[in-house]
Image (cartoon, rainbow, N blue to C red):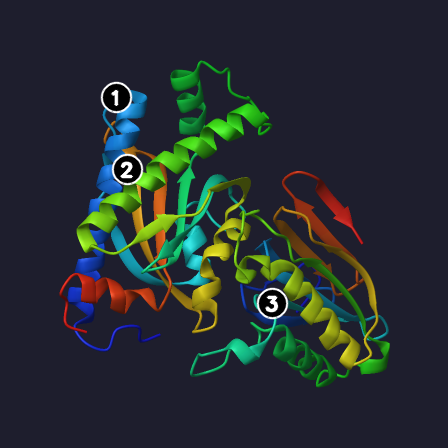
Amino acid sequence: MTEGTLIKVGMADLNIAEGGAMLRTTGLGSCVGLTLFDPILRIGGMAHIMLPSSDIAREGQLNIAKYADTAVPELLRRMTSKGAVTGRLIAKMAGGAQMFALVGAADTMRIGPRNVEATKQALEYFSIPLVSEDTGGNYGRTVELSSQTGVFSIRSVQFGVKEI
Amino acid sequence: MNLFKNDADFKMDVLREVGNIGAGNAATALSTLLNKPVDMAVPTVSLLPFEAIAERVGGTEAVVIAIFLRVEGDAPGNMFFIINKEPARRILQGLLGFNAAENDNYSELELSALNEIGNILAGSYLSSLADFTGLHMSPTVPSLAVDMAGAILSYGLLQFGTMGDDALLIDTTFLEGHQEAEGHFFLIPDPESFDKLFRALGVPL
């Protein structure tokens, strides 16, 4: 991995980057794009979380990148195996929107806020500080993390690009 | 993901016919609204990885106009009417005399009109499906978004999300002038709904 490399993280997927590579996930709606960054070793990680809890999983082979409660420990494991130190990691996240406001909608339609909440709980469990977030609203986001600087950039149709 | 235990090919054919009947009615309704012929392609039924579903309408970041509604009743599911920007503009101009937005800034009135059109089309799709199957199916109040396809469509994948990383999509493309795609009808039945649909249609499970 060299500078300028772009690593795509799909839906319900996670990956790590080092050596200046960028991590990118596109079209986040109710999903949450969580990133972890070790500022000393300059290792970044990103998960595209789709659902809050693996308790609701009925799949045979669990995709641990999909659920907040399993994606966070897996991302942590992948990063520490590359030498990152849990106590140094900082988290940033975006997404968790409510794209459609349906009248009298079932709880499943409030999945965005629930994903955000569950992700925060998982971070708290490992005492990883969430330094900034851009969550909620009713619009989609594409996010990128630089493993060189830890800068997290968020693009939306309405508001253009912002960095946090 | 192994959604159907037996006769998978036959079941896919049955679902294609479900899409044919529903979207056929909706195409007729659209044609009446526009006062010109609207064709549709033969529906495709496929079990697709989540990301591939957005590829059908230009990729996860492509900006689309989508009307979403939840199907309630005996065989619940998610329905999207996705319309491309150019046909949306023509519909607004032709049907309502609006000088539709040149950029992506749609007025409240324009969005409301598109939402209502989506409502009419989805209603005709579902009512023909309900007649055909004898099942009770009713749409929720529709909701419209102009945004990235990935962000929008992920809403229709939550029910499949707990089961695996693929979803079954019944996709019908509307055509204008036999070639250019006007838009899509996506029906994504909840995983539990397939047995009910098949039972109602006399397909052995």
**What residue is disc 3 on?**
A49
Query: What amino acid is labelled 1 in the image?
Result: Lys
Q: Which of the two labelled residues, at mark 1 and mark 2, occupies the earlier sequence position?
A: 2
Residue A32 position, x and y percent, is 64, 62
Tell whether B148 sits left or right of A121.
left
Residue B109 position, x and y percent, is 54, 24
Query: Regarding mark 2 in the picture, which secondary structure is present there?
Result: helix
The image quadrant of residue B78 is: bottom left
x 57%, y 47%: residue: A101
Subunit of mark 2?
B
Spatial separation of the CA atoms under disc 3 and disc 2 = 35 Å
x 58%, y 27%: residue: B108
**What residue is disc 1 on?**
B36
| Figure label count | 3
Verify CB contact (< 8 Å) between mark 3 and mark 2: no
> Which is more foreground, mark 1 or mark 2?
2
